[in-house]
Image (tube, helix red, strand yellow):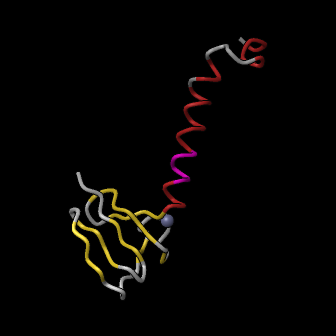
Amino acid sequence: MSIDVHVTGGGTISNGELRVEPSTVARCTLCAREVEASASIVEGVLACAACLRDRLDAMSVARFRLRESRSGSLPWGKVTS
Ligand SMILES: [Zn+2]
């Protein structure tokens, strides 16, 4: 699956093909804002760096809370289990 990217003031990359288009305005579907750059998640859905970062953080936190903190390897895990 190719990742399409829109860059404000620059253009787009779609299917690996560069299209220079200074009038391009990148938009994020998730936060509904105009952004510097956005990348496609699925057809027609684009996300900005901040939204993607939020999701990466959420994954890290969830992984920690659901798995690592229950493994007993942490001091407070030992106390409560
Ligand atoms: Zn966003």
Give the x, y percent position of residue 78.
74, 12
Give the x, y percent position of residue 30.
45, 64
Image vertical order of residue 58 relative to residue 80, above or below? below
Label tally:
0
Name the dominant secondary structure of the magenta segment. Answer: helix
Give the x, y percent position of residue 27.
42, 74
Front-lying residue, 13 or 58: 13
Which residue lies at the image location 24% right of the left edge and 55% below the top edge?
2
Which residue lies at the image location 44% right of the left edge and 70% below the top edge?
37
User: Magenta segment, which residues?
Assistant: 53-57
Give the x, y percent position of residue 35.
49, 74
Quarter location, residue 20:
bottom left
Which residue lies at the image location 42% right of the left edge and 79% below the top edge?
8
Which residue lies at the image location 62% right of the left edge and 19% below the top edge?
70
Image vertical order of residue 56 relative to residue 70, above or below? below
Front-lying residue, 41 or 6: 6
Image vertical order of residue 7 relative to residue 42, above or below? below
- Relative horizontal placement of residue 78, taking residue 39 as reference (left or right): right
